[in-house]
Image (cartoon, coloured by chain):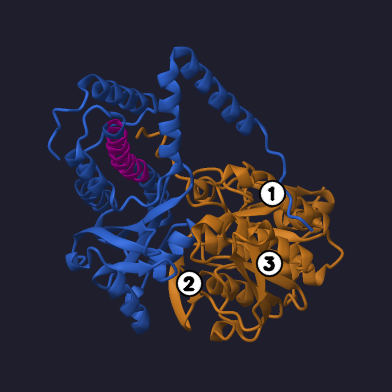
Amino acid sequence: MTDEELRPAWSENFTPDAIQEMLAQGPFAKITPEWAWGNSTGKGIRVAVVDSGVEYDHPALGDCVRGGVVVEYDSKARDNYRIKADDKPMDVSGHGTACAGIIHSIAPEAEIYSVRVLGRNMGGRAIQFAAGLDWAIENNMQVVNLSLSTSLEEFFGLFHDLTDQAYFKNMSLISAVNNIPEPSYPSLFSSVISVAAHEGHDPFTYYYNPNPPVEFGAPGIDVEVAWNKKQYLVCTGNSFAAPHITGITALIRAKHPELTPFQVKTVLLACASNTKRQSK
Amino acid sequence: MSPDKDINEEKLSEQLQRLLISIEASGRAVLPKSNDLLLKSIVDAAARIFGAAAASILLVNEEQEALEFKVSTGEADHDLVGTMFPYDQGIAGYVFMTGQPIATSNVKEDKRFNQDFAKSTGYVPNSLLATPLISSDDRIIGVMEVLDKIDAQSFDIHDMDLMGLFAQQASMAIEQSQQIDSIEQALIRGLKRLAKEDKTQDSPDLKAALDHALIGENRASDLLELADLFNDISALGEAERKACLQVLNAFAEYRKSTYAPRRFSK
């Protein structure tokens, strides 16, 4: 391996030295965190967590979990998957519960739906994931947390289509970028909000990165999270950064239901911790 | 297996040559013969590079639908080698199911978690970093873990980034060494066919030996079929071999250039 190849993946954009100052001028300078989400609790916003499931009765979640589905791989079914209702969702690993816990801690009155897309059949991994996103689109979720991705090129087209459908339905998709330095979908698409981890711990401190493809950096290093079987754990990964932005997005959308996905992204940029407001 | 004098030596050398050429053509590096030695050297290197007290590798066992604990170094319990963990259990299971690495610390704080950890790592670590081993066609072939960062509280995001790159190299090596096993199977198959074809002299000993060698290979991989097919076509002559390559190349190029959206039926 050469030094060039050893370059770290996406979180390098959010080290203290690498963070660049952004400018918000004119009308954009008037967009402040106070305006964007002050006093918002995310009330009534439907948030889907597409992941390993969500443990509905984990104490860290209050009773924010309103329902969910399990997407199973089935080679005999049309499109190779099958969806079952899951009114009292469980979590096969703990990861989805961790994401839901972060979202709930930021947007306590948002309604969380568990979309479990992980199972034992690895051949169906990407199709289950895509079908879970499809379910979220068809069932009018407003914000979707995707701390998963696929690097299978054959799914580029399907995910592109799904994320565009979501975008035109006014949904905000928040996607954790792969921790492994290779292209993965849908995090690299411009119709989603992509997130990597930075080293801070304040849930409302996040940064914008002007060098695509990763747009935002949020806390994801040594974060204390809820885990399945009523546990808590300290975890690191881009997976835990995305739910911070998901929570903030739920707050913004609850307070400003008229905003479109591209306006939400503009508000997120204007309120980023590395954005300087200049009134002129 | 003892070589049978009755086998047509010319045919055998032809067959071997063809196999060797196709191995060469596919650009496969020749690696240390023993998979176990390779895995051991990978975990030793991982522990050293990441300043970890221990490291281990679990590889997919498709028949058991489980991750099999293959090798460990440092404090981790060597008795665990061979133990199976279901795909959907614990941290390794999560990493396997999602293909995403994960780092945790403060592991000792939770009793229940301790037990899970003790079961899957051989001892209870303070910190852990687990990363998937991903093959070139995006299959997850296993999980690599480094345990207990020696000079720090936990593994950080840079460790995770580096471990991702390290795991890429490790996966490539493991995959290649597994393919070499497959190639050996192909070689045995080629010999078996040869033994069958040689109608002039029957060689039951060889057939029996080859049959024995093939036990356990119930799942013929597509890749092997393709290699066999290619070998058959190549045998027809140089022009046929070139035409076959051209067709495959054209198809590969065509697939690379088209990203037509696939849609779910509504």
Position above or below: B103 against A59: above
* Of A267 and B58, the residue lying toward us: B58
Query: Badge 2 local density, few (<14 within 10 Å), some, or many (20+)?
Result: many
Q: Characterize the local packing of mark 1: few (<14), some (14-19) or many (20 or more) Cα atoms within 10 angstroms.
A: many
Q: Are marks 3 and 2 on the same chain?
A: yes
Farthest front residue?
B200
- Identify the residue under disc 1: A158
> Which residue is found at the position 53% from the left and 72% from the top?
A98
Which mark's residue is nearer the viewer, 2 or 1? 1
Q: From the image, state the color of chain B.
A: blue
Q: Residue at x 56, y 61 (%)?
A: A241
Q: Amino acid at mark 3?
A: Ile
Q: Give the amino acid at mark 1.
A: Leu
Secondary structure at badge 1 equals helix
Horizontal and vertical percent position of residue A19: 56, 48
- Write down the residue under mark 2: A93
Q: From the image, which quarter does the C terminus of chain B lie in?
A: bottom right
Give me the chain letter of mark 2.
Answer: A
Residue span colored magenta? B170-194
Q: Quadrant of residue B227?
A: top left
User: Which tint is chain A?
Assistant: orange
**Secondary structure, magenta segment, majority class:** helix
